[in-house]
Amino acid sequence: MTDTRKPPPVATTDAGIATASDDHSLSVGPNGPLLMQDHYTIQKMAQFNRERVPERVVHAKGSGAFGFFETTADVSQFTKAGIFQKGRRTPMLARFSTVAGEQGYPDTVRDPRGFALKFYTDEGNYDLVGNNTPVFFVRDTIKFSDFIHSQKRLPDTGRRSHNMMWDFWTLSPESAHQVIILMSDRGTPRTFRHENGYGSHTFLWENAGGDKFWVKYHFKTDQGVENFTDAEAQAMSAEDPDFHRADLWNAIESGDHPSWTLEMQVMPFADAADYRFNPFDLTKVWPHADYPPIEVGRMVLDRNPENFFAQIEQAAFEPANMVPGIGPSPDRMLLGRLFSYPDTHRHRIGPNYLQLPVNQPRAEVHSYNIDGAMRYRHSGNQPNYSPNSYGGPQADPAAELPYWPVEGGEIVRSAYTLHREDDDFGQAGTLYRKVMSDTDKANLAANIIGHASKPDMQSDVQARVVEYWRQVDADLGAQVAKGLGNGG
Ligand code: NDP
């Protein structure tokens, strides 16, 4: 807030003209009609009507903070990206969010959490737009909007529907790995500070010599993973719908700066072709035993926003922002998101969203894009077409991001090529049997049963719910059948 010890400045219109009153509109006599020439009052009302930009369709409710990322290990053998050179410290912004709820929704509901990072590197903005889970509900971008619709509201009642969610999930068995994590207590994190973040997708790194490596990002919380139980999360939704927002803000304000250690899994480029799973399938992790995580760096959040709207609401993260030394992979969800994120920002904030202070790169911008609503940074009399003979910016072929060779062939609509152990339920079953404690398992079963026994659940969908969990694990399926009173 403003320093109250200083004398306040004179109030002005947005054109900087001093104003006479913030208490009284201009009227004909004390009891008379209001006047059209009261530009200041009209400006206040008209501006107020336009205060909101459309909220994000997904990840609408979020919180964020600024900080830095520091590379602590030498990984130059894997990538030439400046941000990942040992000792480099890069300013950054993080935004955490729920996925399905709207802006006023409670923070502690069962939902994945967005974990979006923007690094203001010397080579341009690098955005890593992940979640607090290493996998996702679907593996092809064509299903994304259907999945989100199933999490949102029914067309007739305008209410959310557990029946709709389970209908979609049980008809989309690739969702099982993400749904088991969502239904576990990791679906209700205690705070944003006590959750891990994952780049989730597979990306491609390239070193200075042109060698390529497939990689996955894991930001492990230094605060330790802590979750609410279902009952605690529900109680907190009623007590303080902004609990996560308050926790993050208060921790940073009190000097308790949250941090995360970045660990990477690195797969030699050639391994992908016959790895036992499809390494680009977003519903799968790479088991740690196959590709042990290596420590790379640390991110620290140490500064709250000064203005929530300008710095968090208008923040625009886009997985397409990749800097030299980092590229995409054939992951179909990632390839879809390369388009959909910048597209939503153009719609939500406007075509010149990258000129807003929070989105502006620290690196200089010399592009041939011009004009559009609200553009304020212009390139003067620089030529606005390429090629030109008048000293306009020149592209650098060395700046091409790394890619992979693509075989010729027919244009098809098809699942990924099968690898030996590709399936929908295996890794969910491994998580249940090999990783979860007895308490995790008991809470998971109770959470599933509670979630799938809401009054709107139809019995045929419930029967499919039982079958879905049976395929993850026979015992878990039996518990769910018993709890739902539906044998499937
Ligand atoms: P590991 O035993 O090497 O790793 C298991 C990992 O699971 C842990 O390192 C931890 O990763 C995460 N984890 C621990 N408790 C839970 C929980 N209650 N819910 C969700 N995740 C938990 O085994 P694998 O690498 O072979 O993976 C086994 C299973 O673990 C996978 O099928 C997957 O479901 C899950 N998992 C694997 C991850 C990976 O990248 N390999 C990452 C996360 C989960 P972390 O601290 O990163 O959360």
Image (cartoon, rainbow, N blue to C red):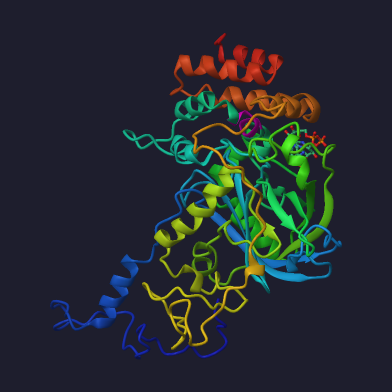
Which residue is at the front of the view, 19 or 341?
A: 341
Residue 36 magenta-highlighted:
no
Q: Locate residue 67, reporting x and y percent.
A: 70, 67
Q: Quadrant of residue 370?
A: bottom left
Q: Is residue 196 left or right of residue 311?
A: right
Q: Quadrant of residue 150?
A: top left
Which residue is at the front of the view, 224 or 379?
A: 379
Residue 179 magenta-highlighted:
yes
Range of residues picked out in magenta: 175-180
Q: Is residue 479 left or right of residue 152?
A: right
In the picture shown, does residue 78 fall above or below 418?
A: below
Please identify the quadrant where the C terminus is shown: top right
Task: State whether the magenta stretch is mostly helix, strand or loop.
Answer: helix
Please identify the quadrant where the N terminus is shown: bottom right
Q: Residue lying furthest top in this view?
A: 487
Q: Is residue 40 left or right of residue 445?
A: left
Q: Is residue 440 left or right of residue 65?
A: right
Q: Locate residue 388, reporting x and y percent.
A: 47, 81
Question: Ligand 1 is found in which quarter of the picture?
Answer: top right
Q: Is residue 240 visible?
A: no
